[in-house]
Amino acid sequence: MTSLPAFALAEAAAFVLAATRVAGFVVASPFPGRNVPNQAKIGLVLMLAWIARAAQPATPDLGLDLALFGLVPGELGIGLVIGFTVRVTFSAAEVLGASFAQATGLTFGQVYDPTLGGEDSVPSRVVTLFSMLLFLGLGAHRVALAYALESFRALPLGHAVAIGAAAPSMVDFLGQAMDAGVRLAVPVMAIALAVQMALALVARASPSLQVFSVGMGVTVAAGLLAILGTIDDAAVGLAGELEREGPRIEEVVSDVAAP
């Protein structure tokens, strides 16, 4: 019969491992987001770790000893793989926003991001925020959290894993996300190209007209009108991409599970 102190130490060790896996997920996932305060992220990690342990009360044979450090990288890797899969799925929106910025010529309008110390273009930031609203509206965050918690059943704490086995699937998912983002931006890019060609022909036919003095305004106006005209189809396409989140997480979890 297991003594109470040993049981408490085993539960504490299991909680540490669960929190490590959840922390990896929170760090790599676009939800709750990079602008969320660290205190809120820590609270989310502790809450999800507590839920994971409450849903699976059977305590493995663990202890607060040096052997615990050998299990931490595997648990962290599982969380990072799941969170990065969600990030890759969401990256279709980031590719779409960057393509819109290039097509409309608004890459010069930059917004400073204090969390990363970098800059994003205005269209990219707008599309990313719109996609996050779509992400939350579709309940994709609930799907991600549910799969993160369900991973404790598919891959129990201390289970041997092969994180590198998920690399081919990750590369495939990244290619699909980039393809979706560029494909949804093709109508706007095609209109922007047509406008640029028309301006070039006008400038060639009448050099004294100095069409490029008004070319920027025409390009931006045409691009914004094209975006407004295709935003419904873009939203449907992004929703379809976000719906592939669950099957992708299942695939990477099955990949990392060592035989």
Image (tube, helix red, strand yellow):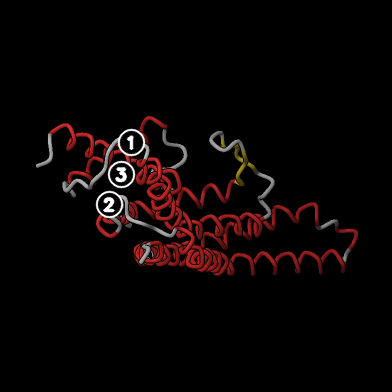
Crowd rating for badge 2 (residues with CA inside 10 Å; few <14, some 14–19, many 20+): many
Crowd rating for badge 1 (residues with CA inside 10 Å; few <14, some 14–19, many 20+): few
Q: Earlier in the sequence, mark 2 or mark 3?
A: 3
Is 210 positioned to the left or the right of 128 in the image?
Answer: right
**Residue beneath the point at 42% across and 32% down:** 37
Q: Element under label 3?
A: helix
Q: Element under label 2?
A: helix
Q: Earlier in the sequence, mark 3 or mark 1?
A: 3
Is 11 positioned to the left or the right of 235 in the image?
Answer: left
Provide the residue designation for mark 3: 18
Q: In front here: 52 or 85?
A: 52
Provide the residue designation for mark 1: 65
* Contact flag, marks 1 and 2 (Cβ < 8 Å): no
Q: Amino acid at mark 3?
A: Ala
Provide the residue designation for mark 2: 149
Mark 3–mark 1 Cα distance, whole angstroms, equals 16 Å
Q: Amino acid at mark 1?
A: Asp
